[in-house]
Each structure stands twice: as C-alpha cells, then as structure tokens.
Image (tube, grey):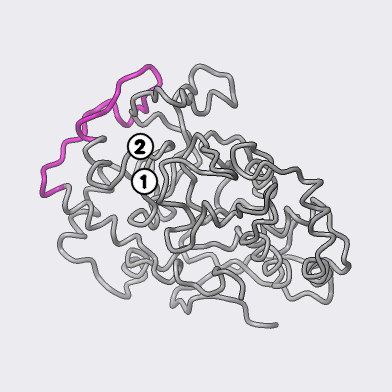
Amino acid sequence: MKKHWKHILTVCVVLIGFGFSNRFTTPIYLEVPNGWPKPTYDFKRNPITEEGFQLGRNLFYDPILSRDNTISCQSCHLQNTGFTHIDHDVSHGIEGKIGTRNSMALINLAWSKDFMWDGGVNNLEMQPINPITNPLEMDETLENVVAKLQRSEKYRKLFAKAFGDEKVTSQRLLKALAQFTVMLSSSDSKYDKVMRKETQFTEQEEKGYELFKTNCASCHKEPLFADDKFENNGLKPDVSFKDGGRIKITKDRKDSLRFKVPTLRNIELTRPYMHDGRIKNLQMVLFHYTEDIYNSPTLSKQLNKKIVLSEADKNNLLQFLLTLTDENFIKNPRFQFPR
C-alpha cells in the first residue's frame, strides 16, 4: 500500500479506512492518535483515496467555485492561520460583499457532528453548499459549478482519477471536498508532545494548564479542545448583525445567543475571535471571560460563577494556550496550494 501523508508519531494510532469502489485508486487513512475518541465522520460513505484527496485539494484552492471566479474556499481558510482568516472580522465574498460571521477554523473536522456557528449543517459533505450558494460569499449554483468543471480538461482528468470516469456531478464534487477537509488533522503541538511524554511544559505552561482545566475545560474538552455543543458565552448581543445563533436553526428560545463551541487548537493563529470576530487578541478574550460577561437567560451555566484570574494567572494561561499551536499542521505541504 502506498504511503500517505503523516507526521512520524511515536504514539500508537488507529487507522480508519474502509473498502474502495475504484480499484485504480489508492486508499489513504486518517490517523487517530492514541487516547483520542473515535471520529464521527462516516468513512464508509466516502472512503478516502489519494486521488479523491487531490481532487478535493484542487477544488478547495480554486475560485472556479464562485460566480465570478474570484473567491475560493482558501480565501477564508488559509493554512498558515489554522485554515481561517485574520484580515477581516467577518468573511468577505465576491465583489467585496461582507458576510455576517467570522469563518471557523477547519481543524479536526472528522470529530465534528455539526458545522458552522449555528450547527446549520450536520454532514461535512453538505457543508460546502452554504458558502458556494450564499449570495454574500461565492454566490454560485451547484449546477453552474458542475458545468464549469465539466468543461475543464484538468478537472475531467482529476474526476476520472478519483471516480473512474470523467463525469462531474455535484455529489462527486462534495465528496471530493470532504475527502480533503476531513484530513485536516492537527495533533502534533507541544501539548500533544507533552501528552506523549516527548517533552515537558515549562513552569508557566504547567500552571496555565492547571488553570485551563479548572476554568476552561468544561467547554473546550481535551484532546480536541472543542465540543459539539452550543453555548451562550456571555457576549453582548451585536447591534449590527443581530445574530441569534442556534435559535436560527432550532427556533427554540433556549438556543438564543448560543453558538458552536470552537476548537482552541492553533488558537494563537486564528484571531479575531468569537462568531463575529469582535475580539482581536487572546488578552481581550481573557478580559471578556473575567470582566465582561453579559448575563442573559441562556447564559452558559459554566459562566454563572465569575472567573477570577490574577495577571500572573492570565499570563500563565496564555502560555499554555500557545502550546496548542501545531507548526507541522500549518506547514504541511500536503495541505498547501497544489503546484
């Protein structure tokens, strides 16, 4: 079997993969680090192959998915910033159109059950439909995208390699994009190396880790530092977008101002923070949680008790958060623009 991309880890891993319909393709596998939960993504429905991954990679970086061929997935999800953007509070689309939310980082999606800040999509293969068709983002139709790809000799060849023939369909398009994004796995930060007993925290990082476990881990659960739950984290309601969060999907008042709990992996790189990008740096994030919680009926119960941190505590906690940066992930050539 041909070797697939991976960092050389000293931990044991579980290889996730299943049968492949095209005997001319090369299966590749997602590595699950020792001690991590089982991925929620259904690999049986969309077995990952090298050819499918490469097709998805090309599609991810190609503005052909947008109406005027100017905006790609990568426009809002840059590898060196943890597959999100840092130049805008909220996403920008074609013709300078401005969206309503900050783009979420694309990290460890194989472990997610729901996607987007409000959980409006519960299948990774369906997630690209939203940005492709959103009038404030790519403003295109799947039918037009399929037609453009079918006219492209490059893509006819890539689809043939991935699926056995040159036929372009929306289902194949979405499966290929998922084959790329589901492999965006980050598990080689300093934190991970400490957990694997390859190195040690500094004194500050160790103190920060203890503070994290006391004050933050109930929502940002190890080892993913995320949760598929939706919480109201005490932000004042915004007056510009008037974004109610999860209630938009469920229509349940209990979900008002609740948003998906994002991962803290590579958090150093993924500013600005919160669903609308209102907080510019991690110091201000800590100020929010210690001094600026807005009390409302749906406030997360974890925030009912005031978080008290000294300046030294904040510095130590920040030092720990920096250990979640995974340099191998943001520099992995397998995830870069295809040359």
- Amino acid type at image mark 1: Pro
The relative height of residue 242 versus residue 164 in the rendered view (above or below) is above
Q: Residue furthest front?
A: 95
Find residue 43 and report its horizontal and vertical position in percent: 69, 58
Q: Is residue 308 magenta?
A: yes
Residue bearing mark 1: 272
- The residue lying toward the viewer, choosing from 335 and 318, is 335
Secondary structure beneath dot 1 equals loop
Left or right, residue 339 beside residue 81? right
Q: Are marks 2 and 1 in contact (CB under 8 Å)?
A: yes
Give whichever of discs 2 and 1 has the lower sequence position: 1
Calculate the distance from the C-alpha at mark 2 to the C-alpha at mark 1: 7 Å
Q: Quadrant of the C terminus?
A: bottom right
Q: Which residues are magenta?
A: 289-313
Residue bearing mark 2: 278
- The residue lying toward the viewer, choosing from 228 and 107, is 107
Residue at left offset 64%, top offset 40%: 122
- The residue lying toward the viewer, choosing from 137 and 324, is 137
Q: Is residue 66 magenta?
A: no
Crowd around label 1: few <14 · some 14–19 · many ≥20 (10 Å): many
Q: Quadrant of the N terminus?
A: bottom right
Secondary structure beneath dot 2 equals loop
Find residue 21 and report its horizontal and vertical position in percent: 84, 66
Residue 4: quadrant of the picture: bottom right
Left or right, residue 187 beside residue 184? left
Residue at left offset 38%, top offset 45%: 220
